[in-house]
Image (cartoon, rainbow, N blue to C red):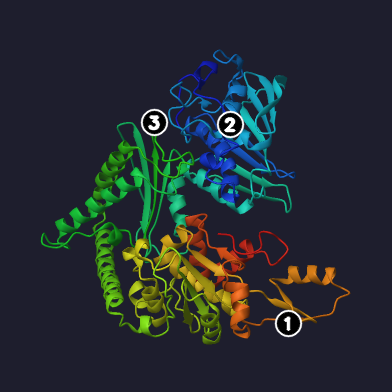
């Protein structure tokens, strides 16, 4: 566990910067959004406070409970929130911490050396966005309670309710349904995040219990956290190196890195700052990449695998098959994030520290493991060759756009006549019949149609060089026009929306998965920028006696219609596939922007998505069966039915 920070954490260490007014008016400024991602961010804020106690060396256990009423309880065995009076505001310290924005022990007051919080707004923001927020504090032999309601209004002042020998803080909160689009927490999402936290704090015990719905519990504790984290990430891959652990301290910044190379050709590098995942990267990952480049290139020159006249291997070459965790602990006076949700680290000192430690320590490892080092370098040289082929393919596409002579552009693609990329849409349509109806029914100014024959190649099992030889994949690359792999540039994309339109059957779902695998692996920015969609065609058409008709999208819609129209006469038609729809029907139900239904593909968690794609589209049948049993609910009535990534 962490070494204890002996600096005082008491009532006087709580510094107030400003009040709590605007959170409910603009919640997105503080938690990113009010959808399910923002909802779960409330949990992260409270858990991060407990993690801060772990990093300070005082907490060893965290319990998170999804209660029957939909609320969340987070309990730790840390020091407990100070229970005295804040002299400046003449209120109890817990009332200040939980109801005043920018109040906490993280502003130079001495409560924490490092913490996951930036602005100290976490707990108060959660309070502001909850209908109930109850705090129980175990400190100084006392049990004290304070309660809030309706967005941070004091419901019960700090009150002693008993005595105790333990220490810690317990918080229970119920999100405000008028703020969030949904207040349903997902066990898998919380479990994944808590598991990461346990990996990042060796020895920490974390327990998650779900009491609402199906009762579940998971427990996490790792003795060699980062190494075990990497081993989990490469669980379905074939490693070519053991897990390498590097660590050090540079100018007060602790750096810990764990990495391994596999036979795979994709990268998976995750960054954390003070135990908070930096989903958008930051200076520590920049330093890691620079240090990696220096170490491998210099060693390749030293042993003769690169000559002075040769071009240096770049980051894209060196990261092929690399899985790495980069974790930094930055002192409070240096920590800087971009945005309250802490998605990107901005501390410049973290770059220098990570680069130095990575370069020096990994250089030593390469020299001590010459055979493995040679394997890594040779793999990178092959990656460079493949990248050069991809660059040539992209250049050929650019040249072809000017000459308009490629088979893809002259043949299968039914292009849109409009030139405004911000409005144009590309429909990837299963089958020539459906593509023909789509071509007739579309808005030809903004909608392009690309028919697909059968199932495309599985991008999880094929290398990029093989993908570029596949006609279907090459046609998609040509149509989008933004390159592929490391050469992909979203700015060059010809379309604002890429819409996958397949039959509502097993084959259609398989085609969707194959296409999503390709986009995730080789055009990930399309997904990250929310430009990939799945069309949702109806299953049923109801035709009345006057020939007027309505469409129903699933079994649930049909059941509701039948119940409501028992005394009416109508004809029920079930569409077996897109090819059964004429151009008018396809336009009305699936292509008309004013009435269609689309599913926007979103990347909630890169680590979970990477693991899911590897299992679902890889070679290991047993792993696939196991994953499906654990993650897919075979019911249309459950809101969580479907694949959880």
Which of the numbered marks, if any, corresponds to residue 622?
none
Give the class, few, some or many, for how many residues have Cα within 10 Å of label 2's Cα (few <14, many ≥20).
many
- Outermost residue toward the right in this view: 567
Q: Earlier in the sequence, mark 1 or mark 2?
A: 2
Q: Quadrant of the C terminus?
A: bottom right
- For label 2, the SS is helix
- Outermost residue toward the front in this view: 546
| Residue name at image x 69 percent, y 67 percent | 634
- The residue identified by callout 2 is 124
- The residue identified by callout 1 is 573
Residue 321: tell me if it is visible: no
- For label 3, the SS is loop
Q: Position of residue 106 (x, y in %)?
A: 47, 27
Q: Earlier in the sequence, mark 3 or mark 2?
A: 2
| Residue name at image x 64 percent, y 43 percent | 179
Residue 333: tell me if it is visible: yes
Q: Position of residue 598 (x, y in %)?
A: 58, 66
Real-space Cα distance between discs 1 and 2? 54 Å
Q: Position of residue 55 (x, y in %)?
A: 47, 33
Real-space Cα distance between discs 3 and 2? 23 Å
On screen, residue 270 versus residue 622, left or right, reads: left
Real-space Cα distance between discs 3 and 1? 65 Å
The mark lying in front, picked from 3 and 2, is 2
- The residue identified by callout 3 is 331
On screen, residue 75 versus residue 552, left or right, reads: left
Marks 3/2 in contact by CB < 8 Å: the verdict is no
In the rendered view, tell whether residue 522 sits above or below residue 342: below
The mark lying in front, picked from 1 and 2, is 1
Marks 1/2 in contact by CB < 8 Å: the verdict is no
């Amino acid at each position: 566990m962490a070494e204890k920070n002996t600096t005082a954490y008491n009532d006087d260490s709580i510094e107030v910067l400003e009040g709590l007014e605007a959170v409910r008016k603009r919640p997105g400024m503080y938690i990113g959004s009010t959808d399910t991602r923002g909802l779960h961010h409330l949990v992260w804020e409270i858990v991060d406070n407990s993690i801060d106690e772990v990093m300070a060396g005082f907490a060893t256990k965290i319990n998170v409970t999804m209660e029957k009423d939909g609320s969340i309880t987070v309990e730790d065995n840390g020091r407990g929130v100070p229970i005295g009076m804040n002299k400046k505001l003449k209120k109890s310290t817990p009332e200040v911490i939980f109801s005043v924005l920018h109040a906490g022990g993280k502003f130079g007051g001495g409560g924490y050396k490092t913490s996951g919080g930036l602005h100290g707004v976490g707990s108060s923001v959660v309070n502001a966005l909850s209908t109930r927020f109850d705090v129980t504090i175990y400190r100084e032999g006392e049990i004290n309670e304070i309660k809030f309601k309706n967005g941070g209004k004091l419901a019960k002042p700090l009150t002693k309710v008993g005595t105790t020998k333990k220490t810690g803080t317990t918080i229970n909160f119920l999100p405000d349904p008028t703020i969030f689009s949904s207040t349903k927490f997902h066990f898998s999402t919380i479990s994944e995040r808590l598991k990461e936290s346990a990996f990042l704090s060796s020895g920490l015990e974390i327990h998650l219990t779900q009491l609402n719905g199906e009762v579940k519990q998971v427990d996490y504790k790792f003795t060699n956290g980062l190494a075990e984290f990497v081993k989990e990430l490469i669980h379905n891959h074939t490693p070519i190196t053991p897990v390498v652990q590097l660590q050090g301290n540079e100018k007060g910044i602790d750096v810990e890195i764990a990495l391994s190379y596999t036979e795979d050709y994709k990268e998976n590098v995750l960054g954390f700052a003070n135990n908070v995942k930096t989903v958008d990267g930051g200076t520590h990952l920049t330093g890691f990449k620079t240090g990696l480049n220096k170490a491998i290139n210099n060693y390749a020159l030293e042993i003769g695998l690169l000559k002075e006249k040769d071009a240096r291997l770049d980051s894209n070459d060196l990261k092929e098959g690399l899985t790495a965790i980069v974790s930094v602990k930055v002192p409070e006076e240096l920590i800087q994030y971009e945005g309250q949700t802490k998605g990107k680290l901005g501390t410049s000192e973290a770059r220098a520290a990570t680069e130095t430690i990575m370069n020096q320590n990994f250089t030593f490892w390469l020299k001590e493991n010459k055979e493995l080092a040679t394997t890594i370098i040779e793999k990178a040289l092959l990656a460079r060759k493949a990248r050069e082929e991809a660059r040539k393919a992209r250049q050929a596409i650019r040249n072809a756009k000017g000459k308009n002579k490629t088979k893809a552009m002259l043949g299968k693609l039914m292009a849109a006549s409009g030139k405004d990329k911000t409005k144009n849409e590309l429909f990837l349509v299963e089958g020539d019949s459906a593509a023909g109806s789509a071509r007739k029914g579309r808005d030809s100014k903004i909608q392009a149609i690309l028919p697909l024959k059968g199932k495309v190649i599985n991008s999880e099992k094929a290398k990029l060089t093989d993908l570029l030889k596949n006609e279907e994949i090459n046609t998609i690359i040509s149509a989008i026009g933004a390159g592929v792999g490391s050469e992909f540039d979203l700015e060059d994309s010809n379309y604002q929306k890429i819409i996958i339109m397949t039959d509502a059957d097993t084959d259609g779902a398989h085609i969707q998965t194959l296409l999503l695998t390709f986009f995730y692996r080789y055009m990930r920015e399309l997904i990250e920028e929310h430009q990939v969609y799945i069309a949702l065609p109806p299953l049923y058409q109801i035709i009345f006696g006057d020939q007027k008709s309505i469409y129903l999208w699933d079994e649930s819609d049909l059941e509701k219609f039948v119940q409501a129209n028992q005394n009416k006469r109508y004809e029920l038609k079930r569409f077996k596939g897109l090819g059964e729809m004429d151009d008018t029907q396809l336009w009305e139900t699936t292509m008309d922007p004013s009435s269609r239904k689309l599913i926007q593909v979103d990347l909630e968690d890169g680590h979970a998505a990477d693991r899911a794609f590897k299992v679902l589209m890889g070679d290991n049948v047993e792993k696939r069966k196991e994953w499906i049993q654990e993650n897919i609910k075979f019911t249309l009535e459950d809101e969580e039915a479907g694949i959880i990534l």
